[in-house]
Amino acid sequence: MRRSLRFRIAASAALLLALSVPAMFARADVTEGASEATNEGKWFNPVTDPDWSNDFWPIVIAGVSTGQDQPPTVYEPTICECPSRLFGEPLPGIGITYWEGKFIYEVTRKPGVLMTMGGQNILGSTYAKQTGGAKGITAGAGSPSGTRSQVHAYNYPVMEVVGDMFDDMCMNDNDGFNLDALTEIDPTWQNDTWALITSPETSLFADAILHLACAVEALVSAFTYPLDPVFWCSGSWGSVYPFSGNTNAHNGNQQGNASLLSKFIARQFRFGMMYMTAGPGAQCSPTMSPIWLKSQFRVDPIFPQAKRGPSIYIGQTEVRWGYFPPANYPQHESSAYLVWNAKQCCMRF
């Protein structure tokens, strides 16, 4: 009888512990080694947070479209010809273009805090002090309103959750979920001077005339797609150079964080960490390019609030998507985004 009672007590305690552990991890302010309590975080829900009306769409198969517009760079000929996988000889195929939910990016001033993972701090308080980004710092002398933020990049192939429709025939590069990058551990992201080492061309784009091109793109991208030839700009979000986490004052957190998002994506291309999956060079397979293709991406904010409706193109003014409530949260400095990646495919049989 006593053994039975002890067993029931132990079982009840184990059940209570099992039920309490998820709740502990779900709280953003309970993090082991956290530098400070933060309510900036929630668990990303892959079912309810993405706007599934943006998944795949628009799809174009053999020239037949779902009827929605897309950038002219995202184009595959109706009948295409690409090398076969087995023998390398050219084979005819059917051209397909579609959009895949591929990446999640977090932009935060709290180093180590993973907003889409419940606000957990995986780096601890010591590292936060070393980076100096926890409270926001100046971008440099004479820029008291500048801040430094960190970016966390996840490979999050939403298509794999739904089903790999085109993997076999289109040779997708899906490789499962993983945390790809933490800028906190990269010294070149923390300092503009160090960033010049990785991108010495930065000085070329300080010219005033080239900045006028950014103003033109800001106007164009407000109504249509970004201008890919103006690769040193990200529309109304600002310049992508230098490739560091420092940014000057913007109209609000939304625009400033979007600017850092574009900096990071352009930087990943520069380092050979991302591939061009749209445009003439990607007709048969993804290709490496040191210059990013802005029109290859669409953005859905998922934190602090998941956005519904059409996705945002790089450089699109935040007045259209994030300047006014409820999209703009003054109490939140951090943002997270689900990024859709355009894919082209020559579907060979």
Image (cartoon, rainbow, N blue to C red):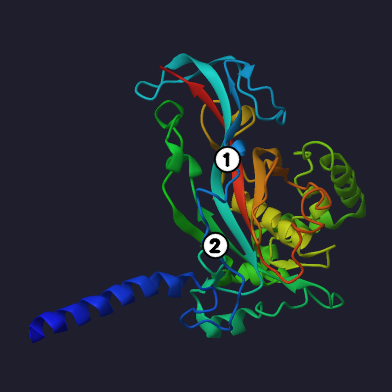
**What residue sits 65% from the left and 38% below the top?**
296
CA neighbours of label 1 inside 10 A, class few (<14), some (14 to 19), many (20+): some
**What residue sits 57% from the left and 37% below the top?**
55
Amino acid type for the residue under numbered disc 1 = Trp
Q: Please state which of the two labelled residues, at mark 2 or mark 1, is closer to the viewer.
A: 1
Foreground of the two, 280 or 120: 120
Taking the image as shown, residue 238 lies to the left or right of residue 21, namely: right
Amino acid type for the residue under numbered disc 2 = Thr
Which structural element holds mark 2? loop
Taking the image as shown, residue 63 lies to the left or right of residue 137, namely: left
Farthest front residue in view:
1
Residue topped by disc 2: 116
Foreground of the two, 77 or 334: 334
**What residue sits 64% from the left and 53% below the top?**
306
Foreground of the two, 122 or 173: 122
Quarter of image, res 311: top right
Tell me the number on the disc at residue 52.
1
